[in-house]
Image (cartoon, grey):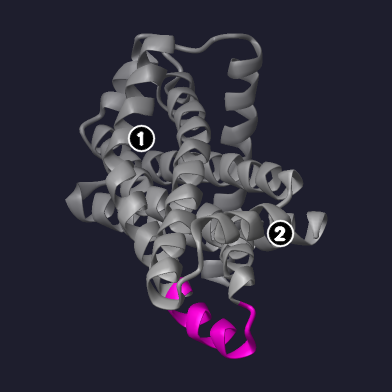
Amino acid sequence: MGSLNEIVSYIGSSGINLLETLKFIARGRVNIENTAVQTVKAGIGSLFIVVTTQSFIGLAMSTQLAKEFEKLGAEAFIGGFIGLATVRELAPVISAIVVAGRVGAAISAEIGSMKVTEQIDALRVFGINPLRYLLVPRLIAASMVNPLLTIIAAIVSIMAGMVLSNASVDVSYSAYLNSVRQFVMVRDVFIMMFKAVVFGGAIAIIATTTGLEVKNGAESVGNATTKTVVWSIMAIFTLNYIITSMFF
């Protein structure tokens, strides 16, 4: 029951923080400079990992599909299957997991360290709301960066699959791209972007809430960082199922 109570309490805290943050955003109380800094930190640091990860995912999918489709004489459909799997599931989910592991963990560790060194209390003394100062820029940054990373991830994965399909079973680039266009609809891309925005926002909320709940000592900061990554990944898969069920 203790763990269940902890989960319920944590979800409640995250929900309250989200509502407070949305109020600040609706009122236009956003620190543009801080938001820009957080956007650059989140995007630049994650780009290489996302590109590398998605390249190998595209290569792996193409390796498995190419030979099987060749047996069926359906090589022209390889691009469509890779594109559909990438846009609907792999690009938004894998990119969000990378962001959770890198950006979410960094946010939690940073805010947890601030909590331990009483910098959060200092903000309150100076009349600065910690959520406005810490969460608003990070929520906006994560919600902007994750969709951009997801677009790049989808393109890289599809292109990697195209190169390998051409090399392994001699599927022409034009046939591959025509298959992608035939299978992947504009609606799929919009749903992918919606998923990416939701996942990015969820990661920022979870990381900040976990960081603010740090109580004492470096060990607590480490535990908060681990909790952020684990709960972010759980939230990503849960939200992915909910959104997929809504639209498909």
Residue 86, position as x, y percentages in the image: 56, 60
Residue for point 40% across, 58% down: 54
235 or 53, nearer to the observer? 53
- Residue 229 is marked as none
Q: Residue lying at the far bottom in this picture: please name it.
A: 71
Residue 196 seen in render: yes
Query: Is the residue 138 above or below the residue 29 in the image?
Result: below
Give the quadrant of residue 5: bottom right
Q: Which amino acid, mark 1?
A: Gly
> Which region of the structure is painted magenta?
62-74
Residue for point 58% across, 54% down: 177
The Cα–Cα distance between marks 2 and 1, rounded to whole angstroms, is: 29 Å
Would you say the magenta stretch is mainly helix, strand or loop? helix
Task: Please name the residue that numbered disc 1 is placed on.
Answer: 43
Residue 13 seen in render: no
Give the quadrant of residue 212: top left
The answer to if 71 sits in the magenta stretch is yes
2 relative position to 160: left or right: right
Query: Is the residue 139 above or below the residue 45 in the image?
Result: above
Number of other residues with Cα within 10 Å of mark 1, as a class: few under 14, some 14 to 19, many 20 or more? some
Residue 235, position as x, y percentages in the image: 56, 57
Task: Please name the residue that numbered disc 2 is placed on.
Answer: 183
